[in-house]
Image: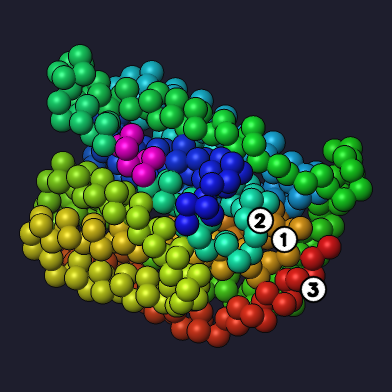
Amino acid sequence: MIQRINNRQVISWALYDWANSAFAVTIMAGFFPVFFKQYWSAGSDITQSSFHLGLANSAASLVIAFLAPLLGTIADQAGSKKRFLLLFTLLGIMMTGALYWVEQGAWPVAMALYALASIGFFGGIIFYDALIVNVSPKPQLDFVSGFGYAAGYLGGGLLFALNVAMTLKPECFGLTDAGEAVRWAFPMVAAWWALFSIPLFLFIKEPRPVGGRRSLRITLRLAAQQLSGTLRQIRRLRVVALFLLSYWLYIDGVSTIIKMAVDYGMALGFDSNSLIVALLITQFVGFPAAIAFGLLGERAGTKTGIYIAIVIYLIVIVWASKMESTWEFYAMAVTIGLVQGGIQSLSRSFYARIIPADKAGEFFGFYNMLGRFAAIVGPVLMGWVSMATGNPRLSILAIAPLFVLGLLLLVFVDEKKGYRRASANEG
């Protein structure tokens, strides 16, 4: 294993996950939802602030969902995945850092900056994911993908642990209170994201496009033609289309649990500090688990690893609907940490195998488009069931069908056939 990761390009690629995961954990899942309610929306109705937060999340997801396929296609045509990645990375970094200066009560400004930072984060992932075919041979895709997610869990978790310590003991860091500690977390995440992104831009080699560099007008015209052709190609590549549908369903469940876990725990009456600690536990458990799932994918098969993760998620959902105490929430955090990175990394490597490598940008554009739409259905289901029944415990059960349907569709995805078709369609 040491020999396999002793590669400058692989390590540089994985360090980007280490870098941007700080935003996903500290900002998106951790501090921003709490600070948005308690500081920027202070005095507002709690349901209204939840609506505003949901609107910011949905707006960012929809922007990327609609732009992802076209941007990925343009990047393929122009050989500019790294350029697009740099553009979105800078957007995310600057908007995240700017949150430090937003005054109390200025929720519209905080909402706008957060939405733009999220667009930078999600937009960058399109091109980061697509670069995996440039840094890893197909036999090692499971391991390399898992290594990237593992780096993300560890890197994001380390900075999040420091930020949590700052909020719990602000006086030890020369800060006046927890609020000031949270505000400092925003520029710290921006600096972390910027620093550890540098190796990717220095050391990852991106092949030049066939036919050399082109003008913007020609690139856009060819990108539009290629995008239209890819849509037809996906319809012909039944394995790809079927997997994307399966992925959209089960990753919706995964995304819903990530985004709604803290809110669900608060609805059950758990202390917010306990929920933040549980989130931290998930990060550090996810580090070795993502690597383990990468090795599992190589030995037992990628689909087998995804099957195992989906079944465990179904068990967690049933368990969550019945839990009563904080220790159960901690135990559930450990369980989710064991499979969250695994299902994400194996899905990425599975998809990378069944698509043409020379069109990775546009194909991962569609992949990330579905990932963004997947963050919409589950929360709506949970909210509707919770309001209709008045019982938040029943709301978590509403996302179980997403996992079940995703699992059933995955059974019919023929990986070997997809690999053969992808190889035949390259070039």
Q: CA distance from mark 3 to mark 2?
A: 16 Å
In the picture of the structure, the residue carrying the numbered disc 2 is 133
| Relative image position of residue 77 (x, y in whole percent) | 81, 49
Residue type of the residue flagged with mark 3: Ala
Q: Horizontal placement of 289 versus 241: left or right?
A: left
| Relative image position of residue 292 (x, y in whole percent) | 39, 62
In the picture of the structure, the residue carrying the numbered disc 3 is 424
Depth check: 85 or 145 in front? 145
Instruction: Tell me which label, 1 or 3, sits earlier in the chain.
Output: 1
Magenta residues, as a range?
A: 154-160
Quadrant in which the C terminus appears: bottom right
Residue type of the residue flagged with mark 2: Val
Q: Is residue 155 magenta?
A: yes
In the picture of the structure, the residue carrying the numbered disc 1 is 357
Depth check: 46 or 364 in front? 364
* Residue 311 visible in the snapshot: yes
- Kindly state the secondary structure of the residue where label 3 is placed: helix
Q: Assign the magenta stretch its main secondary structure.
A: helix
